[in-house]
Amino acid sequence: MTFLTAEWRNLLMANYAVDPAVLRPYLPRFTELDSFDGIHYASLVGFLFDNTRVAGFAVPGYRQFEEVNLRFYVRYREAGGWKRGVVFLKEIVPRRLICAIANTLYGENYVRFPMRHEWTTGTDTLTVAYEWKVRGRWNGLRAEADREALPAAEGSPEEFITEHYWGYTQISERCTGTYRVIHPRWRVHRVRAFSIDCDVEQVYGPAFHDALQEAPRSVFLADGSPIRVMGGDRIYNTLSF
């Protein structure tokens, strides 16, 4: 059953190499860390929700809003093979109701801060920025990218980062939440310049300070698409119910 439909647009994805020992305390039970060429990534992702509907209904004031999240990559084995997914360490949005619904129904880690975004289209460039305000200080991500978007190359980091279609959350020591996100493959814009201004310890805690102070291994801008977030399930052992 579809829980939410929306469009995710202009996803700015900064991808950092992280020591797996930093990620393991956040790993939901029954999942394992996923990697690309031996690198375990955490991604700082800013994007825009647009035309959002919950259970088919548009909620005034909640049709369009920004999100910035920090996530890492996992996989879960079930009959038929691996499901590749993400675990969200923190998801920042500008509306309290979004936090209440997502945290209650899906066990997510949403928090509310004031947010804003900027998109500027040039002759051959696209500039995007996503910002959030914590204790009176604006934090943000900004990139200048090629205006033209191209398919992600097979076997590339861009393909690995974008081709994860499940979310996993730690419900308890015995239970992991899971849900599916459905969308087509995204095209990517090559990023020419990237900057970040973030009080990492204030926003994400000391565990991620070192990793997010380094330059990201890759940065790209995905064009996005309409998406569907399906209703959640629970995993209690090696089977889903």
Image: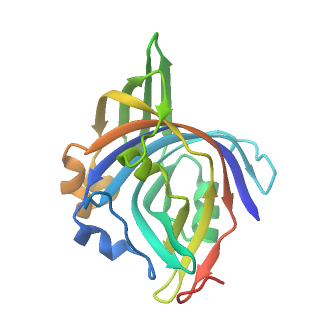
Q: Residue at 56% of width from left, 88% of height from top?
A: 236
Q: Is residue 55 left or right of residue 25?
A: right
Image coordinates of residue 10 in percent, x first then y, are: 51, 35
Above or below: residue 188 compared with residue 166: above
Most extreme residue toward the top, as rendered?
Answer: 123
Residue at 37% from the left image edge and 46% from the top image edge: 156
Rendered-image quadrant of the N terminus: bottom right
Q: Is residue 135 in sight in this rendering? A: no
Q: In the image, residue 41 lies at what x, y percent?
A: 31, 57
Q: Residue at x 73, y 60 (%)?
A: 3
Q: In this orientation, does residue 102 appear?
A: yes
Relative to 155, residue 166 above or below: below
Q: Is residue 165 left or right of residue 217?
A: right
Residue lying at 49% horizontally and 77% vertically, measured from the top left: 77
Image position, residue 217 (x, y; %): 25, 45
Of the pair 28 and 222, the residue shown nearer to us: 222
| Above-or-below relation of 84 to 120 | below
Residue 89 location (% of width, % of height): 41, 62
